[in-house]
């Protein structure tokens, strides 16, 4: 087990940070009262929001930007640091993006960049108004997709706490965390239709000390997706579904991807999703490493593939024939996972022939198939370590010649 999987220090530091900041008189920067914003759903919030941020960021004492209740139209905003003191945003209202995807020339709507000692809270809603984008976002229309905005981006953010915020109907990912350190996302609500493409709930990469806690995620893609360079992460008390589950990856598609290590997922409930606890890597020439990944105490409700390692991940079937994944997987555990599978194949370990999975552990698994057939378990290029009650019996099912693609 990885000794560094400890949520307490980073959260404790954040708690002390915001308690100490609250003891100092906080300057309030109200976008309506002080900067002329209008909660009419038509007047662009961009300039009042940015002006309020700049003044608050320049303050030498802790400051709070306030967005009162009401509905605001926001074309886009880029909120940059570093700031001179801790800074908060109290979002009480509903902030709406332009519904027309052509309003965006790059994949940014609300972006926080190079900010330290930051908190956002208040119960507000970021509404991406993505329904038009969903209709046009197809596999063939990649140029269109490249310009679709993420609802909220956190880039190079350090020591942050994001609480009680809703992200709704994002045109692409809801929340993207990149190159961040010690950031906690707690009590979030993320929602998009189950048919909405590429609407990952929370995606991250090249970040350390990310904690995702007590959040409800309903979307059309991965509830949480973990990209390369992610280290020392805790995910717990998540309800996920509909969607594609909680996924490590996909990895191995690009050169020079950084290792993923030290991820713990626990006390989650996953319902009516295509996948549950998943690791996915592309076949091909690019390497990588995934280690110390632990899924524990998870309930699966009618999940198509509750437990899945897929090293032949190729959703568009455009990979070269007989290619093997070069990503090395090691020290992975699935413990105390129970519930129901929508398909007979409750457990699928499809590991690489050129780099077989090492030290994969199954313990106390009880997954029943919802249909007439019993649940089965498939294993390719792996010999799992087993203990406790195990249903289905490990590696009891045949491996198809061509394992089916997963989304």
Image: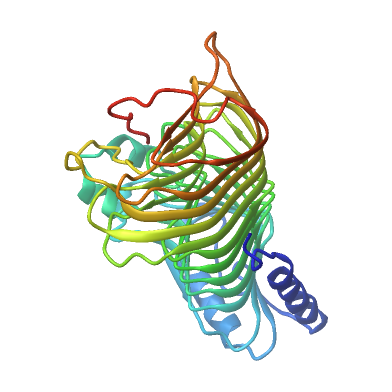
Instruction: Judge by depth and name the residue closer to the eye, 65 or 205.
Output: 205
- Between 379 and 80, the one lying in front of the other is 379
Residue farthest right in this picture: 23
Residue 38 lies left or right of residue 318; in this view the side is right
Identify the residue at horizontal 28%, vertical 38% (top origin).
136
Q: Is residue 72 above or below residue 196?
A: below
| Numbered marks: total | 0
Quadrant location of the C terminus? top left
Q: Using residue 13 as the reference point, say whether residue 220 is left or right of it.
A: left
Q: Position of residue 357 (x, y in %)?
A: 43, 48
Percent of width and height locating residue 184: 64, 63
Residue 397 is drawn in which quadrant? Answer: top left
The quadrant in which the N terminus is found is: bottom right
Colouring style: rainbow
With respect to residue 113, does 338 lie above or below? above
The residue located at (72%, 72%) in the rendering is: 9
Q: Is residue 57 visible?
A: yes
The extreme top residue here reads: 372
285 over 12 or under it: above or below: above
Locate residue 32, reporting x and y percent: 61, 66
Give coordinates of residue 127: x percent, y percent: 51, 48
């Amino acid at each position: 087990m990885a000794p560094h999987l400890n949520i307490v220090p980073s959260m404790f530091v954040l708690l002390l940070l915001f308690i100490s900041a609250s003891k100092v008189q906080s300057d309030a920067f109200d976008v309506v009262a002080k900067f002329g914003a209008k909660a009419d759903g038509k007047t662009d919030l961009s300039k009042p929001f940015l002006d309020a941020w700049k003044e608050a960021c320049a303050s030498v004492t802790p400051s709070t930007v306030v967005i009162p209740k009401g509905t605001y139209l926001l074309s886009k905003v880029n909120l940059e640091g570093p700031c001179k003191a801790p800074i908060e945003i109290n979002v009480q209202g509903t902030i709406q993006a332009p519904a027309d995807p052509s309003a965006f020339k790059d994949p940014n709507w609300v972006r926080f960049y190079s900010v330290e000692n930051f908190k956002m809270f208040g119960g507000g809603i970021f509404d991406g108004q993505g329904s038009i984008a969903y209709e046009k976002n197809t596999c063939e229309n990649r140029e269109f997709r490249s310009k679709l905005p993420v609802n909220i981006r956190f880039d190079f953010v350090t020591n942050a706490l994001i609480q009680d915020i809703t992200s709704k109907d994002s045109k692409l990912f809801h929340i993207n965390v990149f190159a961040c350190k010690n950031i906690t996302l707690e009590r979030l609500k993320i929602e998009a239709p189950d048919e909405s493409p590429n609407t990952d709930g929370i995606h991250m990469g090249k970040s350390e000390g990310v904690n995702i806690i007590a959040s409800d995620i309903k979307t059309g893609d991965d509830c949480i997706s973990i990209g390369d360079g992610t280290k020392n992460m805790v995910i717990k008390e998540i309800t996920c579904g509909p969607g594609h589950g909680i996924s490590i990856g996909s990895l191995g598609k690009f050169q020079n991807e950084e290792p993923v290590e030290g991820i713990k997922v626990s006390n989650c409930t996953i319902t009516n999703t295509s996948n549950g606890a998943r690791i996915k890597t592309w076949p091909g020439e690019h390497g990588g490493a995934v280690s110390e990944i632990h899924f524990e105490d998870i309930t699966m409700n009618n999940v198509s593939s509750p437990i899945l390692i897929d090293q032949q991940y190729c959703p568009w079937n455009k990979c070269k024939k007989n290619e093997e994944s070069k990503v090395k997987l090691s020290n992975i555990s699935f413990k105390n996972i129970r519930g129901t599978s929508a398909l007979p194949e409750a457990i699928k370990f499809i590991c690489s022939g050129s780099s077989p999975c090492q030290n994969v552990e199954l313990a106390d698994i009880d997954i029943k198939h919802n249909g007439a057939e019993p649940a089965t378990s498939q294993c390719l290029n792996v010999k799992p370590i087993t203990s406790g009650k195990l249903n289905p019996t490990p590696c009891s099912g045949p491996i198809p010649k061509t394992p089916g693609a997963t989304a």
